[in-house]
Image: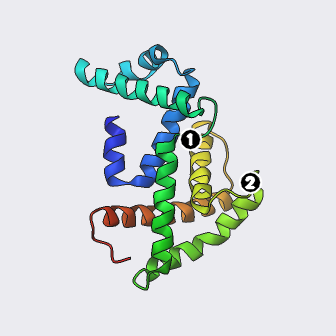
Amino acid sequence: MLIAQKLKEDNIAEYLLYMWQVEDLIRANSLDIDKIDGQIISRFDQPDDVKAEIREWYENLIEMMRREGVAEKGHLIINRNIISELTDLHTRLLKSPHEGDYSAAYYKTLPFIVELRSKSQDKEMPELETCFSALYGYLLMRLQKKEVSGETQAALSQISTFLRLLSQKYKQDRAGELEA
């Protein structure tokens, strides 16, 4: 919860990837708050009142996952809404005459997005979600200590650079500092 709050303020892309990881951690613990408490919350070096807040945060996420039907797969509405917000901002940035740097980063990334979508089972997945899915898949592969080809690493590096820029623009937009 504390990490999520900080990430949401500082870097929306990292926040979204973190929240996807939290969804998977909840699933890995069978949506059981006691397991999550034992495996995750108890390991935090925090006072008991902070741990109680973290536990409540997890309990709320578990309830949302059950209610929204994403207990086995998929993403919470709060996370899908972030993709929607980022997609709206992305569209505005591409249309803005003031955002040439953003457009250049996007068009440099686009061939990788197209290639990833062609390999994906979900050909209709939105472009930004494709980017996030690729990065999340890479993070999972690293956790499993699996090999990643140089070509894939180059694609992920470009996608990461693009999403970092989008996150910066999102933060500027939220602060009212963006002309787009």
Residue drawn at (62%, 46%) of the image: 137
At which x and y percent is residue 41? 38, 22
Horizontal side of residue 87 vs 138, given as left or right: left
Q: Circle 1 is placed at which residue position?
A: 75
Of the residues shown, which amino acid type is indicated by label 1?
A: His
Q: Quadrant of residue 164?
A: bottom left
At which x and y percent is residue 26? 52, 27
Decide which of tag 1 and tag 2 comes sooner along the chain. Answer: 1
Give above or below for 70 relative to 170.
above
Q: Quadrant of residue 47?
A: top left
Q: Circle 2 is placed at which residue position?
A: 120
Q: Nearer the viewer, mark 1 or mark 2?
A: 1
Of the residues shown, which amino acid type is indicated by label 2?
A: Ser
Horizontal side of residue 52 vs 85, given as left or right: left
Pick whichever, 80 or 134, lies toward us. Answer: 80
For the N terminus, the quadrant is: top left
Give above or below for 45 relative to 160.
above
Residue drawn at (34%, 26%) of the image: 54
- Looking at the rendered structure, the secondary structure element under dot 1 is loop
